[in-house]
Image: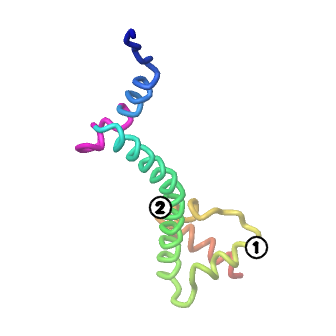
Amino acid sequence: MTRIKRGYIARRRRTKIRLFTASFRGAHSRLTRTITQQKIRALVSAHRDRDRKKRNFRRLWISRINAVIREKKKYYSYSRFIYNLYKRQLLLNRKILAQIAILNRNCLYMISNEIQK
């Protein structure tokens, strides 16, 4: 019987995965089975951490706003500030409020004073 040469499709698939894992250490960038496992693991981690990044930034913004608000008044907190914002129907998101808190504290103090009245 004559020898049958395999096609190039499987090799092309493997080289594509190898290019993805080229920067990984040790067998994670050399052996085909571990390469496929590590690619799946990397993509799962990336998907999970995209949501985690949003969560972490929200926590950071909240802590920044809270720190600046508590500086001025002892018994005024972040939760009361946000409650008063919603009550007054001022639509400022936490990212913008955190930037105001860092760059221009007086402006945030003015906003909180206006809301309390």
Residue 21 horizontal/vertical position (percent): 35, 38
x 35%, y 33%: residue: 18
Q: Is residue 23 magenta?
A: yes
Image point 53% across, 71% down: which residue?
A: 62
Q: How many other residues sit within 10 Å of disc 2, few (<14), some (14-19) or many (≥20)?
A: few
Q: Quadrant of the C terminus?
A: bottom right
Q: From the viewer's perspective, tell me whether residue 57 is left or right of residue 31.
A: right
- How crowded pointer 1 is (Cα within 10 Å; few <14, some 14-19, many 20+) is rated as few
- Residue 106: percent from left, percent from top: 52, 70
Q: Position of residue 37 (x, y in %)?
A: 40, 46
Task: Determine which of the numbered discs, if any, sits on residue 88 in the image.
Answer: 1
**What are the residue bounds of the magenta stretch?**
19-30
Q: Is residue 49 above or below residue 61?
A: above
Question: Tag 2, which secondary structure?
Answer: helix
Residue most extreme to the top? 2
Residue lying farthest bottom?
Answer: 75
Give the SS element for disc 1. Answer: loop
As drawn, is 52 to the left or to the right of 31? Answer: right
Look at the image and tell me in which quarter the N terminus lies. top left
